[in-house]
Amino acid sequence: MNPRISDRMSNLKPSAIREILKMASPDVISFTAGNPSAETFPDRELAEAIAYILANKPAEALQYTITEGYAPLIARTKDRLAGKYGIPTGGDMIITSGAQQGIELAAKCLLNSGDAVICENPSFIGALNAFRSYGARLLGVPVDDEGMVVDAVDELLKRDGRVKMIYTIPTFQNPSGTTMSRKRRERLLELAIRHDVMLLEDSPYFELSFSGDIAPPIKTMDDADNVLYIGSYSKIISPGIRLGYALGPKWLLSKMTVAKQASDVHTTMLIMMAVDRLLDSFDLEAHIARCRELYRRKGNLMTAELDKRLGKRVRFTRPGGGLFIWGTLPENCPSLELCSIAQRHKLAIVPGMAFETTEDPASRGFRLNFSVPTEEQIIKGVALLAESIDEYLEKRGQ
């Protein structure tokens, strides 16, 4: 047999983060994860919810269901988004197997080979690979302290007639940790509407604000139903439940539903019913407040240690929430080599090229995660990072 991989998949590379995680060992401190802290998982409450569903509704929980998902969970999710955050929910919603599936289904339904997607550079590797898998061209836009540089979006829309989608993570962006200003959010939406381009708002972190102040999702401003809003229960309950949702115009959600039928038929019924039960009997808002406090403490600790150990030699973002800090090395210092040096020092970090739209090996950026390591590991890990950077810069004569 001479198997041949499809053109669509032949040039697609595995996630650098997943490959690094495979090499994890107990003696290595890891700042690589994109995970929430296991300390935040409501495992006891979720176990009780699952037990209740299996005891009281086993036939429904263990049977097939409609592709759109468990109707009570959809209604509860819509009510919460509308009531707490003012997100218009007049369009359709489907429950997806994680937010990643929502992104992939959108790519499947909107993109033809050769179409273009405007996205932040750097950006979430899972989304970039989803777009690449359908033959899309990635048009990267720089990110600064106010998020995506929207002036660059305007120029790309004027120049490229095959832009089908704008992809953004506007709040506590992965990997940079930055948050887009309200002014830029408004302008980005205006540009998407004017150029008749779908705006895909990926919003898994927006509730994890250190201060509790929530930046309004772009979807709250969407009177034209031009935003596909992707949300997730992964960062506020647990990632292993693989539960996300897509909210958007009926014409798009109907096609995404058909696409999901070809993918996995429907999201796991037992989990959807258990999460709905959990949300009915669990103080989710108090739980999110505890998550925020934990991440605030860890994020501020990592920022303080970076300031103390590295001063102004490396530039770091200062997120107001989420899970990540982005570092940028001096000119002519690709981060890939730093990651190798750090590995020898028993520290794992993710090179910036993993998040670049061009997968540029010359990328000077690198991502640090503060949600998973313990506070002791953060202090020790930043010290190891400083040692690694000292070695790297000395080697390069800087």
Image (cartoon, grey):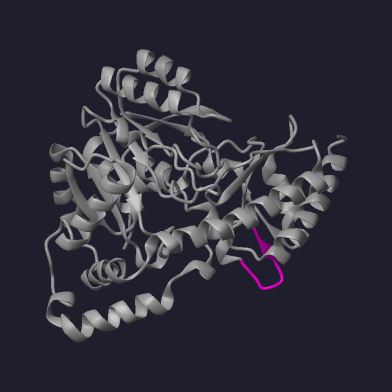
Can residue 93 be found in the magenta stretch? no
How many discs appear? 0
Q: Which residues are magenta?
A: 24-31
User: Which residue appears at 70% of the width and 59% of the height?
Assistant: 378
Identify whether 389 is placed above or below 273: above
Residue 222 horizontal side relative to residue 235, left or right: left
Residue 84, horizontal then vertical, whole percent: 32, 48
Classify residue 188 by image quadrant. Answer: top left
The reply to whether residue 392 is visible in this rendering is: no
Residue 73, horizontal then vertical, whole percent: 22, 61
Residue 255, horizontal then vertical, whole percent: 15, 44
Q: Main secondary structure of the magenta part?
A: loop
Q: Quadrant of the C terminus?
A: top right
Residue 122, horizontal then vertical, whole percent: 53, 37
Identify whether 234 is placed above or below 45: above
| Residue at the limit of the structure toward the bottom, as seen here | 55
Classify residue 107 by image quadrant. Answer: top left
Q: Nearer the viewer, residue 61 or 197?
A: 61
Q: Quadrant of the N terminus?
A: bottom left
Residue 189 horizontal side relative to residue 169, left or right: left
Residue 78 horizontal side relative to residue 381, left or right: left
Q: Nearer the viewer, residue 101 or 181?
A: 181
User: Which residue appears at 78% of the width and 60% of the height?
Assistant: 345
